[in-house]
Amino acid sequence: MKNQEIKELSVDGLTEKLAEYKKQHADLKMAHFVTPLENPLQIRKVRRTVARLATELTKRENQ
C-alpha cells in the first residue's frame, strides 16, 4: 500500500488492514521456512506495509 492510500483510511480501516497484513506476513514467513518462496522480497514488502500502517495508527492516536 502507498502512504497516500494509508492516510485515506479511517482508524477502523487501519486496524483491519493491520491485522490482515500481519496475518499475511506470518503466513509468508511460515511458507518460506517450509519451502523457499519464489520471490522472498514479498516478505520485506509486507513487513514494511505493516510498519507503515502501525506508524499511521500510532500517529493518529497521539493527536
Image: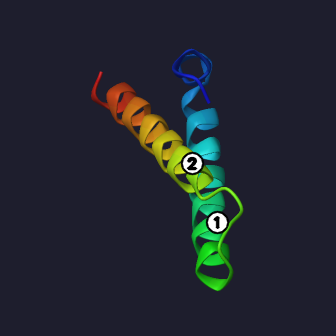
Q: The residue under label 2 is which amino acid type?
A: Val
Answer with mark 2 or mark 1, whichever residue precedes in sequence. Answer: 1
Q: Is residue 57 left or right of residue 3?
A: left
Q: Which mark is residue 44?
A: none
Task: Using the image, determine if residue 5 lies above or below residue 11.
Answer: above
Name the colouring of the figure: rainbow
Q: Which amino acid type corresponds to the residue marked 1 in the rendered image? A: Leu
Q: Name the residue under label 1.
A: 28
Q: In which quarter of the image is the N terminus?
A: top right
Q: Are marks 2 and 1 in contact (CB under 8 Å)?
A: yes
* Residue at horizontal 54 percent and vertical 31 percent from the top: 11
* Position of residue 47 in the picture relative to residue 59 (left or right): right
The image shows residue 38 at horizontal and vertical percentages of 71, 62
Viewer-nearest residue: 18 or 10: 18
Q: Mark 2 highlights which residue? A: 46
* Residue 37 vertical position relative to residue 11 in the rendered view, above or below: below
Which quarter of the figure has residue 4?
top right
Q: Position of residue 37 (x, y in %)?
A: 68, 67
